[in-house]
Image (cartoon, helix red, strand yellow):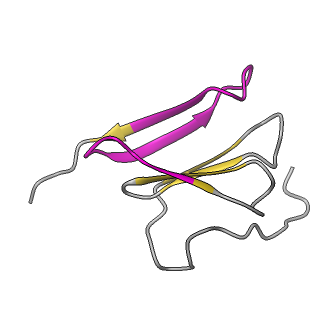
């Protein structure tokens, strides 16, 4: 519940990318997911190893959630990029 913390080694170096979302499987805290602007990152061993996939969209990830009933289902919400 947050009483103690442990560093998780991410695949990306600190300050090298903007992490847009993060989610942890509520039934297995070793399953961690995060996104950057165009990449999805997944670990099932608490950060010892990571798998990446390019996000098949030009939209930016804004919400990430692991289904509370089925940890194999992951939901990703995206937003359109605002043109300036």
Q: Magenta residues?
A: 52-77
Give x and y (percent) for residue 16. 46, 78
In the picture as drawn, the residue positioned furthest to the left comes out as 84
Q: Residue at x 44, y 67 (%)?
A: 18
- Residue 62 as seen in the image, left or right of residue 3: left
- Residue 12 as seen in the image, left or right of residue 31: left
Q: Residue at x 46, y 56 (%)?
A: 20
- Seen from the viewer's position, the closer of residues 48 and 14 is 48
Q: Identify the image quadrant of residue 47.
A: bottom right
- Residue 45 as seen in the image, left or right of residue 41: right
* Image mark count: 0
In the picture as drawn, the residue positioned furthest to the top comes out as 69
Q: Identify the image quadrant of residue 24.
A: top right
Say if 82 sits above or below 11 in the image: above
Say if 35 sits above or below 6 in the image: above
Say if 78 sits above or below 84 in the image: above
Give x and y (percent) for residue 46. 80, 56
In the picture as drawn, the residue positioned furthest to the right comes out as 3
Residue 60 magenta-drawn?
Answer: yes
Q: Residue at x 21, y 50 (%)?
A: 81
Give x and y (percent) for residue 74. 58, 31
Quadrant position of the C terminus in the picture: bottom left
Give x and y (percent) for residue 82. 17, 51
Q: Residue at x 72, y 60 (%)?
A: 49
- Residue 39 as seen in the image, left or right of residue 67: left
């Amino acid at each position: 519940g947050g009483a103690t913390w442990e560093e998780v080694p991410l695949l990306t170096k600190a300050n090298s990318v903007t992490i847009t979302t993060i989610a942890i499987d509520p039934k297995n805290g070793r399953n961690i997911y995060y996104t950057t602007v165009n990449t999805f990152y997944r670990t099932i061993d608490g950060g010892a190893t990571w798998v990446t996939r390019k996000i098949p969209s030009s939209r930016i990830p804004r919400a990430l959630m692991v289904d509370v009933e089925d940890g194999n289902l992951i939901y990703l919400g995206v937003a359109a990029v605002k043109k300036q």
